[in-house]
Amino acid sequence: METIQGSVPVPDPTTLTNQLVEAAVTAAVERLEARLHGTDELNIEKFSNIGTRFNELNARLTESDRYKQTALDAALLANKDSLRKTEELFSKQIDALQKTVDDLKGSVRQSAGAHIQGTETLAWVIAACGAVAAIALVVVDLVHH
């Protein structure tokens, strides 16, 4: 039952329109807030999953680093042991060569004392030195390989 008072009808359509617009805006804001809240929860869950994945990856990398370090330590120890054994072998071979040189010196002295020709003795000494040098080169080659 509308009555006209002046130029504004009763009830005022402008007031009714404003109330309807306000109700629609309020409903839209509530829906938007609900969606944003749901999106926030979804984002929190996604980021939580990403954090979990990073933690798992970090744990695997840490474990992998430990395995690598253990393998490196074992390789270095084996290399150190191998070098020690090579050094011992090389030392033994040098001692054997020194004994051979000493024996050759004794032979040279005996030869000189027995009046063997000097050139023959010199030839034996040179041959012996060549043999010693050849053995030394073989030993050096074995050490480097």
Image: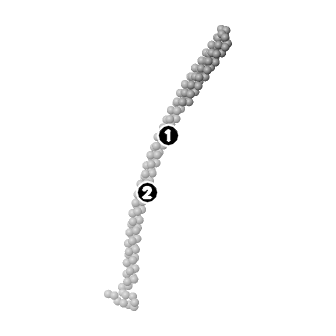
Q: Is residue 60 left or right of residue 95?
A: left
Determine the secondary structure under disc 1: helix
- According to the picture, the residue beneath numbered tag 1 turns out to be 69
Please identify the residue farthest to the left as the structure is shown: 1
Q: Position of residue 145 (x, y in %)?
A: 54, 30
Is residue 72 left or right of 49 when viewed as pictured? right
Residue 75 vs 17, above or below: the answer is above
**Position in image of residue 7 (x %, y %):** 40, 90
User: What is the three-letter code of the residue carrying label 1?
Assistant: Gln
Q: Residues within 10 Å of mark 2 (few under 14, many from 20)?
A: few
- The reply to whether residue 105 is visible in this rendering is no
Q: For this rendering, which residue is in front, 97 or 14?
A: 97
Query: What separation in Å lies between label 1 and label 2 (alpha carbons)?
Result: 32 Å
Is disc 1 surrounded by few (<14), some (14 to 19) or many (20+) residues within 10 Å? few
Q: Which image quadrant for residue 128?
A: top right
Mark closest to the chain's N terminus, 1 or 2: 2
Residue appearing at x 55%, y 27% in the figure? 142
The one nearer the camera, 132 or 8, is 132
Q: Does residue 143 appear left or right of residue 46 in this picture? A: right
Visible residue check, residue 40: yes
Q: How is the image coloured?
A: one colour
Task: Give above or below for 1 relative to 89.
Answer: below
Image mark for residue 47: 2
For image coordinates 37% across by 78% down, the residue present is 20
Point out residue 6 in the picture as x, y percentages from the top left corner.
39, 91
Picture quadrant where residue 129 is located: top right
Q: Residue furthest top?
A: 114
The residue sitting at 40% across, 67% down in the picture is 33
Look at label 2 and name its amino acid.
Answer: Phe
